[in-house]
Amino acid sequence: MAATRGQGQGLIDYLLAIQEMQEPGFRRLVYASLPPAVAQQLEIGNRARIELISLIDTFGRYPQLQPWQALQGRMNELLPDNPSVKRLAAELARLGLIARPG
């Protein structure tokens, strides 16, 4: 399942609410866990919002590779107690992009 344009804007806001996502180095750590076919398509730059638009568009082209699940799994590893990461997981589950958190 892919996010709609409106959902994509909301997901960008959820991602940017994770303060670490403002840092290019942190975003690279997150992207390292994505399926290679997805990661290779991302437009990488220094502006977080532009990069995340590319991420959402790319994820929409590869739903069968479960990129949202990979991204959320990496976020849980890197920031296990971060409330913004938990809110992102809840929103992704609500949209049907990942399994509901246990």
Image: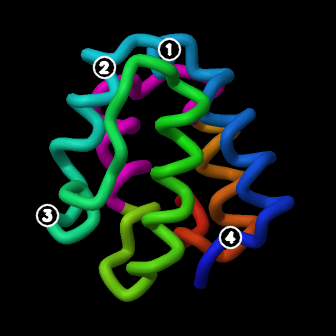
* Quadrant, the N terminus: bottom right
Task: Please name the residue that numbered disc 1 is placed on.
Answer: 22
Horizontal relation, residue 53 to residue 74: left or right:
right
**Render colour scheme:** rainbow
Residue 77 location (% of width, % of height): 28, 34
In magenta segment, residue 74: yes
Crowd band around label 1 with a 10 angstrom C-alpha radius: few (<14), some (14–19), many (20+): some
Image coords of residue 82 (percent x, y)? 53, 21
Q: Earlier in the sequence, mark 3 or mark 1?
A: 1
Residue at numbered disc 2? 26
Residue type at mark 1: give it: Gln
Lower position in the chain sequence, tag 3 or tag 4:
4
- Disc ID at residue 3: 4
Marks 2 and 4 sit apart, C-alpha to C-alpha, by: 23 Å
Tell me the CA gap for discs 3 and 1. Answer: 22 Å
Location of residue 74 (image quadrant): top left
View extreme (right): residue: 6
With respect to residue 81, does 56 lie above or below?
Answer: below
The kind of residue on which mark 3 rests is Pro
Residue 97 at x, y percent in the picture? 59, 71
Determine the CA span between mark 2 and mark 3.
18 Å
